[in-house]
Image (spheres, rainbow, N blue to C red):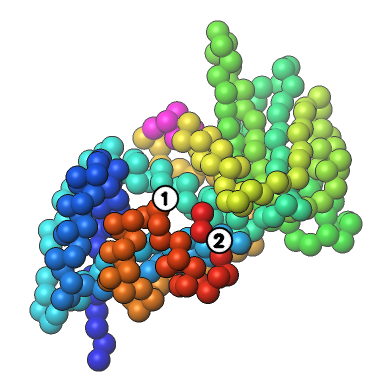
């Protein structure tokens, strides 16, 4: 028999959790009250060495059942949701596609050359083309990259100073720097290898999100993409299951989130360390 489930608004519940312990307990009691028609969905997202688990309830939908009326979300809640999803997307893409052998690069301009945003974006595209040419000439694998064009307002100066942050496939660091300095005469470049921590490359990804948020504030009202990645970036692997975790175990996790390591250890057969 094919059973259909409707997704629960678990992000709304999460928002309640952070409002206080009393609201948290109310949410747990609400979850338990739906036991007869509720199952737990486990959504796993694999990004490189990092595995995330989203755990939330779903309800069986009987024949002829109708969905509830959705409440209109406030502008603030939409902005927070979009920011959270942007952070997750960039973090996952970087953890999936880059490692300690790859490069994080910052490209800046000399004081006498402060380009417009359009010119800065064109400079970045030109740099990537030159890097690709170098890699082809040196028999290196196809380039992967993800970059954002950031800006900084100079104090008491009307001109905006743009610069670039990019994650890119491993290659000779001196060559990566030299290509930028040849692209823009007098320009500067800082190039380092990634140093993953327990959370992979999330630190660098969060910095990119911070830059993206600042640009989004500047571009308020403009619906356009602010970060760019190569077409060959691999997408994180997503899997969903409603049989992986019982309602009882989910309640244990909800009531004691700091003491659930044993549950996750058994669920993933000691392949991961809980962070």
> Quarter holding the N terminus?
bottom left
The range drawn in magenta is: 215-220
Q: Position of residue 71 (x, y in %)?
A: 16, 51
In the rendered view, tell whether residue 119 sits above or below residue 240: above
For label 2, the crowd category at 10 Å Cα-Cα, with few meaning under 14, some 14 to 19 and many 20 or more, is: few
Give me the residue at 85% from left, 47% from top: 172
Q: Is residue 143 left or right of residue 59?
A: right
Name the residue rendered at 48%, 31% in the picture: 214
Which residue in the structure is indicated by mark 2?
273
Residue 63 appears in the rendering: yes
**N-terminal of the two: label 2 or label 1?**
1
Rendered location of residue 61, percent (x, y): 17, 76
Residue indicated by mark 1: 85
Q: Position of residue 154 (x, y in %)?
A: 58, 15
Secondary structure of the residue carrying numbered label 1: helix
Residue found at the very far bottom of the displayed protein: 1
219 left or right of 27 in image: right
Can you name the residue that lies furthest to the right here? 138
> Residue 219's image quarter?
top left
Q: In the image, 151: left or right of 130? A: left
Extreme-top residue of the structure:
156
């Amino acid at each position: 028999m094919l059973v259909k489930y409707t997704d629960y608004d678990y992000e709304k519940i999460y928002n309640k959790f952070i409002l206080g312990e009393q609201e948290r307990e109310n949410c747990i009691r609400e979850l338990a009250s739906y036991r007869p028609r509720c199952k737990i969905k486990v959504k796993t997202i694999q990004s490189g060495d990092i595995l995330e688990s989203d755990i939330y309830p779903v309800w069986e939908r009987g024949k002829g059942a109708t969905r509830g009326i959705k409440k209109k979300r406030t502008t603030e809640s939409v902005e927070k949701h979009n920011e959270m999803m942007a952070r997750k997307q960039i973090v996952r893409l970087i953890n999936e596609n880059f490692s300690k052998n790859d490069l994080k690069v910052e490209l800046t301009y000399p004081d006498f050359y402060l380009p417009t945003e359009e010119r800065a974006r064109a400079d970045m595209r030109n740099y990537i083309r030159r890097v690709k040419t170098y890699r082809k000439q040196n028999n290196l694998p196809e380039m992967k990259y993800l970059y954002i064009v950031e800006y900084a307002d100079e104090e008491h100066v009307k001109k905006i100073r743009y610069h670039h942050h990019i994650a890119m496939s491993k290659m000779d660091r001196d060559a990566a720097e030299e290509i930028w300095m040849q692209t823009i005469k007098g320009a500067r470049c800082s190039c380092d290898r990634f140093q993953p921590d327990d959370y992979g490359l999330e630190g660098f990804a969060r910095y990119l999100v911070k830059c993206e948020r600042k640009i989004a504030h500047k571009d308020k009202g403009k619906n356009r993409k602010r970060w760019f990645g190569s077409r060959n970036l691999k997408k994180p692997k997503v899997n969903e299951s409603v049989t992986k975790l019982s309602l009882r175990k989910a309640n244990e996790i909800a009531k004691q989130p700091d003491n659930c390591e044993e549950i996750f250890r058994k669920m993933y057969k000691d392949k991961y360390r809980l962070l």
